[in-house]
Image (spheres, rainbow, N blue to C red):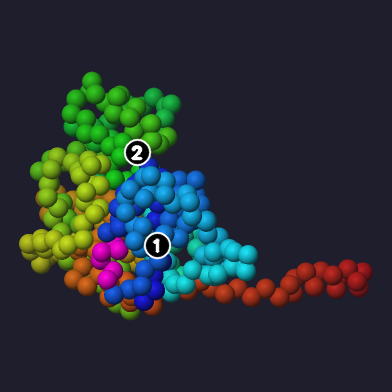
C-alpha cells in the first residue's frame, strides 16, 4: 500500500510528531511510504525517506526543498511542466497537537477530497479540548475524573483538597501540566498552564490508582489492541512521553480479570463509535475501586500506539479500506431557477 505520512505542524508538539513519523518509518515495513512535512510556518514539503532524521528538520534542511500544493485530490509538486501529484492511496495524519488534532487538517483533507486516517473534524474538536472531552464522555455514559475549570483572568476558589493536577485544556504530551501538593504552589502552577492556554482544568490527583491504555479502531469489525498497564510513575512528564512516542516494539499485555477488561473495552467502544470512525485512537483509563474512569482521549497517539497491536500494519491497511464516505450532495440550482421563473411570470 502507498501511504503518505503527514507530520510536523504549527504546534508545541511539533518535535514529537517528527519522532512519531520516524518511528512509523521503522514500523510500516511492507508499505510504500511518502513523508509530507508541515513546517512551523505551515508549508508542505515532500521528504525523501533517507532524509527522515531528526537533525534534517532541526537544521532547517527541509527549507531547501520546494513546497507542495494541496488541492483537489491530493498534494502536488508544481514545476514548469505542470503539477505532478504525490502518489498515495491515502494520508495518515500524524500531526500531534494544534493543526493535527484540533480539526484543522481533518477539515482541509475533507475539503480537498483526500482519503485520510485521523479523527474527522467533530471528533477532533471534542477530543482536542479536555473540557469538551469531559462533556462528551458524560453524554455517552462514560465516567471521567472529577474536574474544575479555570479561565485566565478570572478569580476562582479551588474546590478540591490537595494534591491536585493542573492541565492546559488544549495541549497533550504533559506540556504545562503540574502536580500541586500544597496551596502555596497552586497559583504558580496555574501561571505555568496559562502560558500555554487560556483555559485550564484542575483534577484531584488520584494516588494509588491503576492506569490502563486501550487503543483500537473499527473497520468491518472492532479491532482492539491489547490493554497496557503503563509503568507507573507519579506522572509522565514531557521528556518521558517524548521517549514513549518513539516506541516501535511490543509491550506486555496487562493481566486483568475478564470483567474489568470488558468494562474498559466497553468504555472505549462507547467513546469511539461512531464519532471516531476512520481513526486509530488510544484511551487512557483509571480504575478506582473497580470503577473505570476516562482520563483522556489520545486522538492521534504517539507513533499511533503501534506497540499495542499484534499486526499494526495490516490493521492500517484494513482501515484505509473502510474509511467513512462523505455524502455526495448534488446541486441543481432548482431553487434559484424557480425564483427566476416566478419573477418572469410577475
Task: Categorize mark 2 by other alpha carbons within 10 Å: few (<14), some (14-19), many (20+).
Answer: many
Q: Dot 1 lies on which element?
A: loop
Please say whether residue 346 is one of the residues in the magenta stretch.
Answer: no
> In this picture, which residue range is highlighted in magenta?
24-29
Q: Residue at x 42, y 46 (%)?
A: 60
Mark number displayed over residue 168: 2
Q: Is residue 296 left or right of residue 72?
A: left
Residue position for label 1: 48
One can see residue 312 in this view: yes
In the orientation shown, which residue stands out farthest toward the top? 184
Q: Residue at x 20, y 44 (%)?
A: 240
Quadrant location of the N terminus? Answer: bottom left
Picture quarter containing residue 50?
Answer: bottom left
| Nearest the eye: 81 or 332 | 81
Would you say the residues marked 1 and 2 are in contact, meaning their CB atoms lie under 8 Å apart?
Answer: no
Quadrant location of the C terminus? Answer: bottom right
Rounded to the nearest angstrom, the CA distance separating label 1 from label 2 is 35 Å
Task: Categorize mark 1 by other alpha carbons within 10 Å: few (<14), some (14-19), many (20+).
Answer: few
Residue 177: percent from left, percent from top: 28, 37
From the image, give the main secondary structure of the stretch colored magenta. helix
| Nearest the eye: 256 or 195 | 195
Amino acid at each position: 500500500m502507498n501511504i503518505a505520512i503527514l507530520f510536523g505542524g504549527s504546534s508545541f508538539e511539533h518535535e514529537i510528531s517528527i519522532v512519531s513519523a520516524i518511528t512509523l518509518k521503522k514500523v510500516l515495513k511492507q508499505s510504500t511510504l511518502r513523508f509530507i512535512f508541515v513546517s512551523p510556518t505551515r508549508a508542505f514539503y515532500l521528504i525523501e525517506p533517507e532524509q527522515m532524521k531528526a537533525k534534517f528538520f532541526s537544521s532547517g534542511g527541509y527549507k531547501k526543498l520546494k513546497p507542495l500544493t494541496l488541492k483537489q485530490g491530493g498534494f502536488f509538486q508544481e514545476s514548469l511542466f505542470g503539477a505532478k501529484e504525490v502518489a498515495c492511496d491515502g494520508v495518515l495524519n500524524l500531526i500531534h497537537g494544534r493543526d493535527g488534532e484540533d480539526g484543522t487538517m481533518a477539515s482541509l483533507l475533507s475539503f480537498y477530497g483526500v482519503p485520510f486516517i485521523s479523527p474527522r473534524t467533530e471528533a477532533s474538536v471534542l477530543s482536542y479540548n479536555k473540557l469538551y472531552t469531559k462533556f462528551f464522555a458524560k453524554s455517552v455514559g462514560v465516567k471521567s475524573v472529577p474536574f474544575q475549570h479555570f479561565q485566565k483572568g478570572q478569580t476562582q476558589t479551588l474546590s478540591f483538597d490537595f494534591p491536585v493536577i493542573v492541565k492546559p485544556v488544549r495541549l497533550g504530551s504533559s506540556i504545562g501540566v503540574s502536580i500541586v501538593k500544597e496551596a502555596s504552589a497552586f497559583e504558580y502552577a496555574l501561571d505555568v498552564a496559562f502560558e500555554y492556554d487560556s483555559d485550564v482544568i484542575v483534577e484531584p490527583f488520584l494516588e494509588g490508582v491503576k492506569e490502563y491504555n486501550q487503543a483500537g479502531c473499527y473497520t468491518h469489525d472492532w479491532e482492539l489492541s491489547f490493554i497496557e498497564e503503563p509503568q507507573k510513575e507519579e506522572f509522565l512528564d514531557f521528556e518521558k512521553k517524548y521517549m514513549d512516542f518513539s516506541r516501535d516494539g511490543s509491550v506486555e499485555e496487562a493481566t486483568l480479570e475478564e470483567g474489568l477488561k470488558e468494562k474498559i473495552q466497553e468504555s472505549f467502544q462507547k467513546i469511539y463509535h461512531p464519532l471516531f470512525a476512520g481513526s486509530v485512537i488510544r484511551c487512557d483509563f483509571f480504575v478506582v475501586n473497580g470503577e473505570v474512569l476516562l482520563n483522556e482521549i489520545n486522538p492521534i497517539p504517539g507513533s499511533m500506539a503501534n506497540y499495542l497491536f499484534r499486526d499494526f500494519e495490516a490493521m492500517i491497511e484494513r482501515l484505509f479500506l473502510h474509511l467513512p464516505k462523505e455524502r455526495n450532495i448534488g446541486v441543481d440550482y432548482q431553487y434559484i431557477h424557480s425564483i427566476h421563473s416566478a419573477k418572469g411570470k410577475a
